[in-house]
Image (cartoon, rainbow, N blue to C red):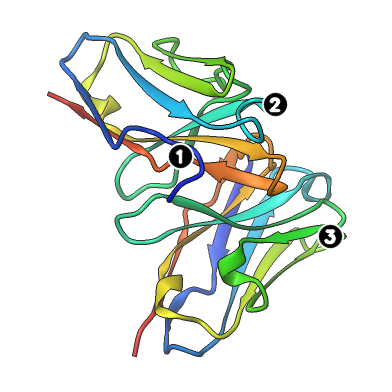
Amino acid sequence: QSVLTQPPSASGTPGQRVTISCSGSSSNIGPNPVNWYQQVPGQAPKLLIYINNQRPSGVPDRFSGSKSGTSASLAISGLQSDDEADYYCAAWDDSLNAGVFGGGTKLTVL
Amino acid sequence: QVQLVESGGGLVQPGGSLKLSCAASGFSFSDYFMIWIRQAPGKGLEWVSHISSSGLTTYYTDSVKGRFTISRDNTKKSLFLQMNSLRADDTAVYYCARDQVRLDYWGQGIMVTVSS
């Protein structure tokens, strides 16, 4: 049972825009920034979005993040086949004094 | 460039011990919190343990408290995870990662299998 809640799956066709949600609480997403990670099967997770909506260098601007209250979202526009991966949200939890993850969302490009 | 390389994984019997290491390079290791994260086969990510830059503050998720010990050697730019009394549900890929706020760099991961 993950502390942050994500849908287990999402899908879209090439070129489409998809969003993945991440729901938390007043001890994690509420007061703290949210990060998003992309994990291609067999590889380590890679930072995709940090501090809610910032992209590390090298991440295409097709990826964007937002946060409102105790929820956050990752949007992927212009969907491509190599976007097929697992996506995880994460935030610091002030009650646990540790980071927490969402359960992950498997994105399928149809 | 920043690199994190884990080692020390493998197959161990229930009740056994392993010590994971994470060798860091390409950044000022002593300036950063470091974290161990694990991923059981087919499952999501779990924050296992972290240690402050100085080593004075540590955290353990409830399921590993009293069994795992995190440590670091800033002079050798290395992070460690001593794992004792291993159980089947500790079977996972273990990743070390940098910076508790961003987790901006991850190692490639090391497999730990607990089985008789």
The crowding category of the residue bearing disc 3, from other C-alpha atoms within 10 Å (few below 14, some 14 to 19, many at least 20), is some
Q: Which mark is residue B56?
A: none
| Residue ID at (64%, 30%) | A26
Q: Secondary structure at mark 1?
A: loop
Which is more toward the observer, B53 or B7?
B53
A102 left or right of B106? left
B113 left or right of B73? left
Please state the horizontal and vertical placement of residue A101, each as a whole percent of the image.
51, 42
- Residue underneath mark 2: A31
User: Which chain does the numbered disc 3 sit on?
Assistant: B
Reply above or below: A10 against A98: above
Q: Secondary structure at mark 2?
A: loop
Q: Secondary structure at mark 3?
A: loop
Q: Quadrant of residue B82?
A: bottom right
| Residue ID at (38%, 61%) | B40
Please state the horizontal and vertical placement of residue A38, each as a whole percent of the image.
41, 34
